[in-house]
């Protein structure tokens, strides 16, 4: 069994990207919680990241994934120039070098999968290095970027609404907007001739989703995305994060997990005697402190859900104990206020 390697350079770059919003803010170190190690079967599938800090892996004819072990980007050679999909800041400055390892074709276009900084804010570096770089995005994402005027995320030079056929040389890519994650839209990036799909922040292979079901702003749409993904004829899925590439089984596992969380919290919520819990809490907080009473009611539901879900999934997917509580909370918000 191989061991998972995560080079110091890549780890430092990831930490810098994650901590950037907290620059200048200091606080006392908190005691580190105990978490279950990543499951051996998942570690065994991890891609080996070289000491240079990133890996270039061909996954289909003309299709390459670049990853630093934490983030994933894609580029496609077309015979008429290279098309990039996403530019994570942890390794975007190395993308020209990564492309040059396999082709002399110049980088001519960058496609944004969505607006989140952690996947596209390396575009600033590319835009400075590559003269005349075309940047393509769906109109929902483009509208936010025009409003933000964020130099890290250059405004797209070309936009489309809902659907787009990207054809360049040998590349035929079908781009379709959905809304499982970002309030400004997410893209399915599908290469039908290659059975290749890129759908960023849908699943994390071998793991539960990130915090709050990967920061989704629409739980209703999020619960639909798994069937949307599985409707595509693919055998390689690039979902943007962590240690190996996803397949159909990873989508099925994440769907089962997400619906288990949802059904668990809904059952607990609908079966709780909320007045009895609030009455007991009022003995300490009084009826005047209604937010404290609500908090007590909701926290009890989340705790019960977290315990149940952890018991069923701790030996199936990594990080159930890390983010399971946030998943129960996100599902409770949906079940109580939206469902």
Image (spheres, rainbow, N blue to C red):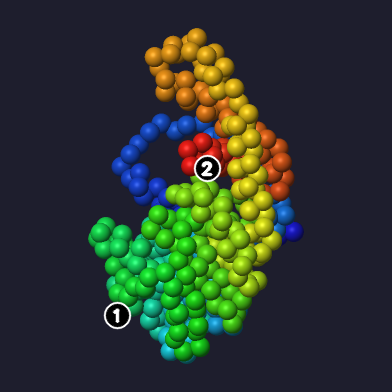
Residue 182 at x, y percent in the picture: 43, 56
Residue named by callout 2: 339
Q: Residue furthest top?
A: 283
Numbered disc in front, either 2 or 1: 2
Q: Residue furthest right?
A: 1
Q: Is residue 75 visible?
A: yes
Towards the viewer: 331 or 102 = 331
Instruction: Classify 10 Å Cα crowding around label 2: few (below 14), some (14-19), many (20 and above).
Output: few
Q: Quadrant of the N terminus?
A: bottom right
Closer-to-camera residue (189/48): 189
Near mark 1 (Cα within 10 A), the count class, few <14, some 14-19 or many ≥20, is few
Q: Position of residue 108 (x, y in %)?
A: 38, 81
Q: Which residue is mark 1?
A: 131
- Mark 2 lies on a secondary structure that is loop
* Residue 283 drawn at (x, y percent): 50, 9
Q: In which quadrant of the rendered view does residue 165 lie?
A: bottom left
Q: Is residue 54 visible?
A: no
Residue at figure coordinates x 34%, y 78% from the top left? 134
Work out whether mark 2 precedes mark 1 in sequence or the reverse, and give the earlier one.
1
Task: Check the image and report above or below for 78 versus 17.
Answer: below
Mark 1, secondary structure of its residue: loop
The picture places residue 106, in percent across and down from the top left corner, at: 40, 84
In three-dimensional space, the C-alpha distance between marks 2 and 1, rounded to whole angstroms, equals: 49 Å
Left or right of residue 337, residue 308 in this image = right
């Amino acid at each position: 069994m191989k061991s998972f390697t995560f080079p110091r350079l890549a780890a430092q770059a990831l930490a810098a990207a994650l901590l950037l919003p907290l620059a200048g803010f200091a606080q006392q170190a908190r005691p580190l919680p105990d978490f279950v190690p990543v499951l051996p079967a998942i570690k065994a599938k991890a891609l080996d990241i070289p000491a240079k800090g990133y890996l270039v892996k061909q996954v289909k004819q003309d299709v390459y994934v670049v990853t630093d072990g934490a983030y994933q980007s894609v580029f496609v050679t077309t015979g008429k120039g290279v098309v990039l999909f996403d530019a994570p800041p942890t390794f975007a400055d190395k993308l020209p070098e990564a492309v040059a390892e396999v082709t002399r074709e110049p980088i001519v276009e960058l496609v944004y999968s969505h607006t989140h900084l952690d996947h596209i804010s390396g575009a600033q570096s590319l835009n400075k290095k590559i003269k005349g770089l075309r940047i393509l995005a769906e109109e929902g994402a483009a509208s936010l970027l025009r409003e933000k005027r964020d130099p890290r995320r250059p405004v797209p030079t070309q936009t489309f609404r809902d659907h787009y056929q990207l054809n360049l040389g040998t590349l035929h890519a079908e781009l379709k907007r959905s809304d499982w994650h970002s309030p400004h839209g997410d893209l399915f990036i599908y290469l039908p001739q290659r059975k290749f799909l890129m759908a960023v922040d849908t699943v994390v292979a071998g793991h539960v989703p990130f915090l709050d079901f990967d920061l989704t702003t629409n739980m209703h749409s999020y619960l639909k995305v798994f069937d949307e993904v599985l409707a595509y004829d693919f055998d390689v899925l690039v979902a943007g994060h962590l240690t190996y590439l996803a397949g159909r089984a990873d989508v099925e596992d994440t769907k089962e997990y997400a619906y288990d969380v949802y059904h668990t919290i809904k059952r607990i919520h609908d079966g709780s005697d909320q007045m009895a819990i609030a009455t007991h809490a009022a003995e300490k907080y009084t009826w005047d402190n209604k937010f404290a009473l609500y908090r007590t009611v909701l926290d009890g539901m989340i705790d019960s859900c977290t315990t149940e879900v952890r018991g069923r999934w701790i030996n199936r997917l990594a990080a159930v104990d890390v983010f399971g509580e946030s998943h129960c909370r996100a599902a409770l918000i949906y079940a109580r206020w939206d469902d």
